[in-house]
Amino acid sequence: MAGRGRSNRRSQNGGGHLPPPWLSGWFDPELKDLFEDEPDLYGTAHRLRSSRPEAQADPQYRQRLRASLMAEAEGSLGRHRLRRWFVPGPGHLAWGGAAAGVALIAATALAVFSGHVQDHQTIMAYSRLTAQHAVSPNDVITVAFNQPMDHQAVVAGLNIKPATQVTTAWQGNSLVITPVHHLAGNTPYTVTIAQPDLRTVLGSVAAAPVEITFGTAPTPPSTPNTTSTPSLNPTTLGQAAAGAGLLVAPDGSVVTTAGLTGTTSSASPAATPGVSPAATPGSPPASTSAPSPAASLLEFPAASGSPIVLGQRATAAAFAPGGGALVFAVADSHGGSQITVARTDGTNPTLLAGSATPVVAIAWSSNARIVYATATGIKSVDVSGATGPAVDLPSGAGALLQLSPNGRYAYLAPAAGTGGTLFDVNSGASRTLSGAVTDVAFTGDSKTVAWIDRSGLTPRLLTEPADQDTQALVSTINPGASLSLVALDYDGTEVAYVLTPASGSAELVVAQLANGSPLAIGPGITTAVFSRHGDALAFLQEVAGGTAVQLASIAGVTQPPVGALPRAAAATLNGFVDAQVSGNSSALRTLSAPEVDVAGQTPSGLTRAYVIDAVLNPAGTVTATVELIVDANATHLTPRVSSETLTLSQPASDGPFIVSAMNVSPLRDQVSGPHVLHVSTAHSNGQYTVQVAFDSDLNPATVQDAITLVTASGASLPAAVSYDPETRTATLLLESAPTGTVMVDVATSLRDINGQHLALPFQGNVAG
Amino acid sequence: MTLPRAYEDQLVERAKQDADAFGELYDHYFGQIYRFVYSRLHNQEAAEDVTSEVFFKALRAIGRYRPSGHPFSAWLYQISVNAINDHYRSRKPTSSLDGAIAVADPQRSVADRVVDSVEAARVWAAIDDLPPQQRIAMSLKLGEDLKLAQIGEIMGKSEGAIKLLIHRGMIGVRQRLDIAVSVEGKA
C-alpha cells in the first residue's frame, strides 16, 4: 500500500505527467534553469508554488497599523518636516477606501494662484474626518493646512451644516473646531470654508473652498429628562476588601481583584452567596465561615452560581481581548509581583514573569502579548514567557498610574504641578492632559481618554481622542457639583461619574458621552466598570462595615428606542431599518409581509437612517416615520434624504411584528436649516412630556412659538415649552396625558443659530 | 508588484522626512510583507505582531537606508527575516496561548486533526522542517517570487549560495513529502 501511494503521488506531482508549469500561469526561468535535469524537483517546486499560502490581512489591522505608523512618523519627523504630508496621494486613499479617497482629494486639496508667493506653494488642506461615516459625536474637527494661514479670515469663512455652535483654536497650521454641545449623533455633516477666506498669511487666496463631508455614529436614544431618569437597581454579588479593583469578563461575569469569600457579613446589603471550591491550585481554600477571610481574585459568574476563586488577591488583572485568557499580577513576598496567565476560569495558571517592584497596571496588546507597568516602567511579556524590551518613560514625569486596555497608552501623574502625562507606549510620544488632572479613564477600545480637570472653581469632565490633543467638555447634570470617579464604556458611548452637590449626598450618574443625557442614576460609589456592550455597570459601594460588589443593568440602553412601543414592535422596526441601511435582503424579507415591495422601494446606497417617531395605534398596529439618508460622496457632494412611512402589524397576538405597508419618497437633496431627528414621549410623576430632538443648534428664542401639540381636530394643547441647547432638544410639558390622537407641529418660524428656517413644516406622531 | 525604480528611489528619499511618503511605501508593500511573515508563522496574531515590528523598525531606520541597487522591498524582507528569526528565538514551543490550548486539547483525536489539515497547507508545511537558511530561501523564492540575486541581497549571500540552498531545500521537501505520502498510504 505504501509503495502504491508513493507511486501515485509521484505520478501526479513528480513532473512526468504534470502539464508544463507555464500552462498553469507560473513560470520561473531561474528555477527552470536550476532544475533543468531534475524534473522531479521542478515538479516539487511547481507544487509548492501552486499551494503557497495566500494570507489576507485583516483590513482593520492594516488600517490600525497604518495609523500608528503615521502617528509615530509625525512625532518622530517633526511638524516642520511634514510639508508634503498634505499633498494628497495614494496614502490618503487608505484612510477611507478608494471611493472615499476620491472625495477626500476633491474636497480638501486646494490649488491656489501662487500670486506673489515666493515659492509658488500650493495651499493644501487635510481632515481625517473626510468621507468617514461613523465619526464619534465626541470628536472635534481638525483641518490641517500646509502653510501658515490668516487665522481670522479662515475662521470667518467657516460654516457647518447642520448649524453647530463651535469654538475654534489653532495648533500650528491646524484649525481645531470644537462643537460647544458635541456633534449630533447619526447625522451627515458638511464643513465648508469659503474660498475668499482661505488666505495665507502672505495674502495668497485659494482657488476653491474647503468642503469636508462626514457622518456621525449613532448614539443611544436620550431619556426624556433627569426627573424621569431611571434609578439603577443593583444586585449585590458579594464583598470586596478595601482597595479592590473590578473588571467585567467578556461573558459578563464580574471579577474583583480582592474579593472576600465565605462572608455573611451583616454589612452587606445582601448575603454573600456561597463560594465554590477554589479552582486554582495553590489558591486559598474556599471557606464558608472564616471569620477573617483572605481576599482573593474572585469571579461572580454571569450565569448565576457560586463565586469562583481564580487566584490570590491581585494588584492588577485583565482579560485577553479574545476572551480566552486572564492575566493577573500578585504581590510576592519580596515587595515585587508575579504575573500569571490562566484560562478565564482560573485553571491552567502559568507563571509568566516576575517584577522586582509592584505591578500597578496590566493590559493585553494582543491575544498573545501582555503589557504591564510598575510605577516607574513598562515591560511586556508574551504568553510563552518571552519578555520584550523595557519601555523608557518620559523624563520628568511622575509615577505611572494607569494603562489603557490595549496597553498602548499610559497615564503618568505629574512629578510636580497639575497636568499629568499621557504617554504613547508605541511611539514614545507624550503630552500633558489639560488642567489639574484626576480620575483618568480610557474607553475599552483605548481610543478615548476622559478625566476630571480640577483647575477651575468647579471641576470639569473632559474627554479627547487618545491620539489627539483636542479636549471636549462633557455636560454633567449638575455643573456646579463636585465630581469624582470616571468610567467609560467600550466605545465611548457612555460615561459614568459621581456627583457630590454642595449639599446632599453623592450620586452615580450614567450618561451618554455625546450629549451628557443621563441614562440612569445610582448611589455614590468608589469604583465602576462597564460591561462590554455597555448594558450593565459593575461597581463597588461602601456600605456599613465593608465594600459591596454590585451589578446593575442600565435600562436606558436596553429599552427600545421608540418610546412606549411593544418591545416586539421596536425590535422589528429597528431590525428592518438596520437591514435597509445594510442592504440585508434576507432580513428585510423576514421582517416584512410578502406583498410589500421592500427591495423596490428602498433607495440604494443608504448610509444611515433614523426613526423620527413611532406610535402604537388603538387597533394594535404601529405607525413609524423614518428618515433614510445617503451621505455625501465623491459623486454627490450633498447628503440626500428620503422620507419613509412604515406600518407594522402583528399577525398573531403573541407573534412577531412585521412591516405590512411602506411608503417611501424619492431621494432628494437635504435642504439647509434645522431638521427633526426624533420625537419621543414619557409619562412620569403625573406629568406628560414630549421631546423633539434636532440636528442643529437652535435659536432658543424661536422655539417656544414654533412647536405646538395639536389634536386630530386641530385644537392646540397647552404645554410649557423649554429648550436644552446641550441636547438640542425641545421639551413640551403637559399636566396630564392627552387622550386620542396627538401630533406635534413644528412651524417654519423655527430658526437655527445661523438664522436659517426649518425648510418645511413638520408634523410628528405623538399618540395614536 | 515592484514600483518603477526611479519613482521608488525618490519615494524612499522623501520618506526619510515625510510621513506621507512612508505611508505610500507602507500601502505598496504591506501585502507582500504580511503574506511572507504569515507564510513563516502560520498564525494571524503572530503575523500581525511581527509585521507591525517590521514596519516600525523600517520607519525608525529609514533615515539610514542606502539604496543597494535592489528594490526597497529587499530591505523590508531583510528586516522581516530578522524579525521572524527573533520571533522563533524568543518563543517557547507554543507560540500563543490559544494555540497551546488547542494543541493540548486531549479531546481532539489525531484523525480529527488530520481531517482539519488541508492539502495545500500540508505541502507548504514541508518547508517548515528545513534548516532555517533553506527555509528562508525557499519561502522568498516560491512564496514571494523574488530573483535569486534579491534573495542573496536579503540574506547576505551570493547568488550561487542561494541556488545551493534552494536546491538542497527542494530535495528536503521532496523527501518529506514522500514520507508523508508513505504514511498516508499505510493509513
Image: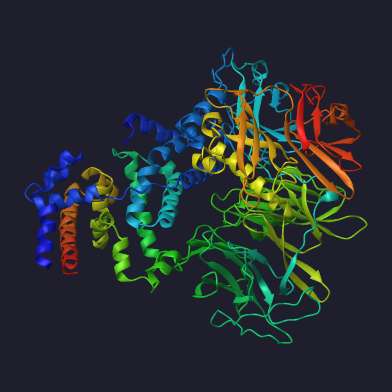
Q: Is A729 left, or right, of B165 in this rendering? A: right
Of A445 and A377, nearer the camera is A445
Quadrant location of the N terminus of chain A in the rendered image? bottom left
Quadrant location of the C terminus of chain A in the rendered image? top right
Looking at the image, residue A495 lies above or below residue A548: above
Q: Is A125 left, or right, of A689 in this rendering? A: left
Of A10 and A406, nearer the camera is A10
Q: Is A335 left, or right, of A84 in this rendering? A: right
Residue at 46%, 48% in the rendered image: B56
Looking at the image, residue A76 lies above or below residue A420: above
Q: Does the rendering let one see residue A27?
A: no
Of A653 and A513, nearer the camera is A653
Q: Position of residue A305 (x, y in %)?
A: 63, 74
Residue at 64%, 64% in the rendered image: A247
Q: Position of residue B29 (x, y in %)?
A: 38, 41
Q: Quadrant of residue A725?
A: top right
